[in-house]
Amino acid sequence: MDQMEKIETLREKTGCTYTEAKAALEASNGDLLDALCWLEQRGKSMVAGAYASTEQQPEPEQTQNPPPQEESAFAKGCKIFWDGIVELIRRGNRNRLVMRDKHGQKTLSLPVTLFVVLLAAAFWVILPLMIVGLFFGCRFACEGPDLGREDVNRVMGKATDFAEDIKKEFQ
């Protein structure tokens, strides 16, 4: 095998450049195996897993998947908290806050989640509007599987009755 064939063999096996292969052959006095080792020791070989050495290497250990780690108490707590928030939002979306006018017609129906967000964002606007609505004869109630119970709506009805009593006192 002549010098040119050795250079081409090195380039094919390692992916190095022509000048790197030539320098490796010169450094190893034309020995192809030593030139290959010389390139790999300098990190010039681009082929994964292609490593040749005259040094004795330890046997690679069998890689096993590590046992699954248990979640920390903090991670469990965060997951429980997040799951609770998600369930609360789902329940809020299933239930609605309904406003009826003095004739019993539905004038407004909002998911409870949206109402809570609006109340948090614009408390000083939403609360006075609700109170004004009570004085104009509007009644608020909840509908849905979780909040549409009689005891919840009874409390909201008491707020309406209280507004009616105050209105009668001023007349």
Image (cartoon, grey):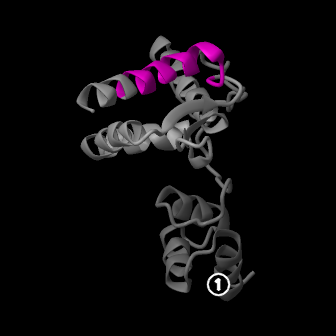
Q: Residue at x 50, y 84 (%)?
A: 19
Residue 47 at what x, y percent from top left?
Answer: 66, 64
Q: Nearer the viewer, residue 23 or 118?
A: 118
Identify whether 74 is placed above or below 4: above
Q: Residues within 10 Å of mark 1 (few under 14, many from 20)?
A: some
Residue in view at x 67 percent, y 18 percent? 67
Q: Residue at x 68, y 53 (%)?
A: 49
Position of 97 relative to 152 (above/below): below
Question: Considering the numbered disc 1 on the image, is that residue within a helix, a strand or a loop?
Answer: helix
Measuring from the top left, give residue 106's x and y in whole percent: 61, 46
The amino acid pointed to by label 1 is: Gln
Q: Which residue is mark 1?
A: 3
Q: Quadrant of the C terminus?
A: top left
> Does 155 lie within the magenta span?
yes
Residue 94 in picture, x, y percent from top left: 67, 35
As drawn, 30 above or below 84: below
Is 29 on the left-hand or right-hand side of 12?
left
Residue closer to the observer: 162 or 142? 162
Q: Is residue 68 magenta?
A: no
Residue in the picture at 52% in, 67% down: 44
**Segment tinted magenta in the rendering:** 147-163
48 to the left or right of 74: right
